Amino acid sequence: MFLHRHPRLIPYLLLLPGILFLVVFFLVPMYYLGFTSLQSGDLFAGYQFTWAWDNYRDAFTLYQSHFVRSLKYAGLATLIAFLISYPLAYWIAFRGGRWKNLLLLLVIAPFFVTYLIRTLAWKTILADQGIVVDALRTLHLVGEDGRLLATTTAVVAGITYNYLPFMALPLYVSLEQIDTRLIEAAEDLYASSVRAFLRVTLPLSLPGIFAGTLLTFIPAIGDFINAELLGTPRQLMIGNVIQSQFKEVADYPQAAALSFVLMAGILVLVLLYARAVGSERATRSAA
Amino acid sequence: MAVEERDAAAARDGAAAAPDIRLENVTKRFDDVTAVDDLSLTIDQGRFFALLGPSGCGKTTTLRMIGGFEEPTSGTILLGDRDVTGLPPYRRDVNTVFQSYALFPHLSIYENVAFGLRRKGVKGDDLKRRVGEALELVDLGDLGRRKPRQLSGGQQQRIALARALVNRPKVLLLDEPLGALDLKLRKQMQLELKGIQNEVGITFVHVTHDQEEAMTMADTIAVMNAGKIEQLGSPADLYERPETAFVAGFLGASNLLPGRLNGEGIVGLDGGGDVRVPASALAGRSGRIAVGIRPEKLRLAAGGAQADGENVLEGVVAERSYIGVSTQYVVETSAGPVTVYAQNAEPGAGQAASPGERVSLAWSPEATFVVDQHEEGTR
Ligand SMILES: Nc1ncnc2c1ncn2[C@@H]1O[C@H](COP(=O)(O)OP(=O)(O)O)[C@@H](O)[C@H]1O
Ligand SMILES: [Mg+2]
C-alpha cells in the first residue's frame, strides 16, 4: 500500500485535520480581517480595498487611551487574580487532602452560569442599594453617597472575578505536581519555610504562573462585557470600541484595524513575557 | 577535606562512646495508627547504624522524627546533648538522603549540591571548592552542569549523597537509599556507601527492609517490628543469637522447635528429647519457649554417628533439592520438619542422603538459640 511504502508521510496525514481546521477557521478569517482593515468607504456606498492605512493611524491616535486603559485594567485584574489564586491554589494543592476535588469544583462553580448572567449578578451585588455598598457605608469605607457600581473598581473587580478560574486552575495543576519531598529536602538543607518556598515551590510553579497569567490577561484585555455592564463611558476598553465600531457604527475597516492592532500588541507582549520567563529559568539553572 | 576527615575519624575512634542521637520514649501516632511505640534508642558517634524491619513497621517515621519532618506525639529527641524536639529540620545539624532522592529538578547538579552551603552563607571560592570536593567524593566531578533528569538512577543517588554530605552534618539519615536501583548497582553502592562512611566518619542512620543490605553495611542494626525495637546489636549478634522468633525469621532462615525449660541449660522438646543450649540463652525465660537452629549449622549423618556433647535429632529425609553451592534438605523429625543446608564441599556431597532415608541431625549447643514462643511458628 501507499502508506506502507511511505511511512514517513503518516505523521503529516495525522496532522491534516488540524491543519485544515486552522486554515479554514484561522488563516482565512485572518486574511479577510486584514483585507477589511485596509478598506475605505461607508456602509451605504460600500467598502473598497484602497490600502487605507489611515485606519491604522486612527487606531493609534483616536483610540490610544482605550488601548492604554485596557492594558491597565487587564494587567491589574491579572495581578489581583494572581494574588488571590496563588494562596488559594497552594492551599488546595497542599492542604486540600480529600476535599481537593470538591474545592476545585467550587472554584469553577461560577462557570456553570453564563458569563453575561454572572456579570449582571455583580451589577446587583454592587448596586447602590446593595448590601456590599451598605456594609461599606456603615464601616465608613465609602462615603454617604459613594458608590461601587459604575467605577473603575467595579470593572476591574468584575474582570478579576470572571477570569479567576483561568488563573487558579493552571496554578493548582503546577503546584499539585510538586513533590512535597522537594520542599522537605530544601528544609533539610537549611532553608527556612520562606526560603524553601522562594527557591523551590515558586520556581517549580512557574509554568502554572505563566499559563495562568496568559489565560487571564489575554481574554481580559479584549473584554468588553464588564466595562459595559459595570462601568461608564469613562471605563470603556478597547473591546467596547471594537464592538461599537462593528455593530453600531458599522465601520468594519476601523473595527478590523483595531482588532489587528490589539492582536499584534498581545502577541508582542506575550513574546516578551515568554522570553522574560524563559531566560529567568535559564539563568537560574546556570547560576 | 582529606585531613579533616582523618581527624574526624580519629576523634570517632577516640571517643567511641559519645552518643550522637538519643531517642527517649518516643511515640508517634497518626490518628489511630501507632507508627512508633515508646521507642528508646542511643546511637553512638561515627556508627553505621541500620534500622531494619518489614514495610510499615515505623522505620521511616523514626527517621523523619530525627530529621525534624515529623514531631513525636510524646518523647524526646537529642542530637549530641542538645534537645531538638520541636525544632524545624533547618535548625538541626542533620541531613537526609531521601528515598527517591528528591533532587531539585529545576536546578543544575552543581546548584543542587551547593543548596545547603548557600543557605549557610558559604560563598565564592570556598563554595566552589567544597561542591567540587563533594562531587569528587562520589566520582561525578564532571557532571555539575547537568540537570538531575539527565542522570541515571545510580548517578542521581550519588548526587543525593553528595548534596547531603557536603554540609558535613553530625548525622546523615538515609531512607532506603538504594531501593530504586537494580540488584547489581545496589550491591556496588552498598560497598561504596560503606567506604564513604568510613572516609567521612559521620554517623549514618540507614533505613532498609533488606536484611542482607543491613548486614553488609551496618556495624549496628536495630530490628524494628510494629513500632518497637525487637533487638539491637551487631549483625553477628543478631544472626547468631536472635532473641525473638521475629528477629530469627527476619534475618535469614531458621528452625524453631517448641519446648519448655527442663533444668539448667536444658530444653525439653514438645516432640520428646532434650536439647542443650547455652545457659545465657535461657536467662530470664520461663514458660513456652522455642529452640532455634540455623539450617547451615546442622550436620547430616547417616545412622547414629555423633561427637560427644552435641545435640542430636533423629528423622527421615522428606525432600532434597540441589542448589549448587549447597544442598537443601527437609527432614521430618519428632519435633516437626527441620531444614538443613549442607555445603557441597566434597565431590558427591550433594548425594549424602536420599529421600526416605533415616538420618540423624547433629549440632553444637553453642549454635543453639532460644526465643519466646508467643508468636505461632515463625520459621
Ligand atoms: N503521614 C501519615 N499518616 C498516617 N499514617 C502514617 C503516616 N506515615 C506513616 N503512617 C503509618 O505509620 C506506619 C509506619 O509507617 P512507616 O514509618 O512509613 O513504615 P516503614 O518506613 O517502616 O515502612 C504505617 O502503618 C503507616 O501507614
Ligand atoms: Mg519507609
Image (cartoon, rainbow, N blue to C red):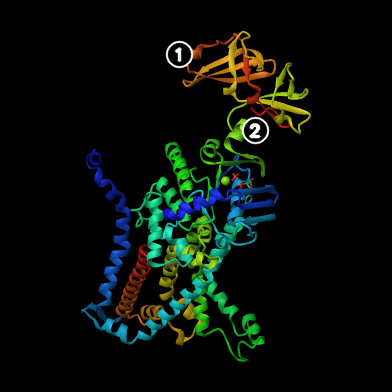
Q: Is residue A215 left or right of residue B92?
A: left
Q: Which quadrant would residue B240 be assigned to in this image?
A: top right
Place of residue B298 in the rendered image (x, y in percent of width and height, measured from the top left): 60, 20
Q: Is residue B266 left or right of residue B148?
A: right
What's the mark number on residue B242?
A: 2
Q: Nearer the viewer, residue A159 or B19?
A: B19
Place of residue A237 in the rendered image (x, y in percent of width and height, measured from the top left): 42, 81
Residue sitting farthest toward the left? A50
What's the mark number on residue B347?
A: 1
At mark 1, the secondary structure is loop
Q: 10 Å neighbourhood of mark 2: few (<14), some, or many (≥20)? A: many
Q: Residue at x 46, y 68 (%)?
A: B121
Q: Residue at x 37, y 79 (%)?
A: A242
Task: Report how many numbered discs are placed on residues in the image.
Answer: 2
Place of residue B379 in the rendered image (x, y in percent of width and height, measured from the top left): 64, 27
Residue sitting farthest toward the bottom? A144
Q: 10 Å neighbourhood of mark 1: few (<14), some, or many (≥20)? A: few
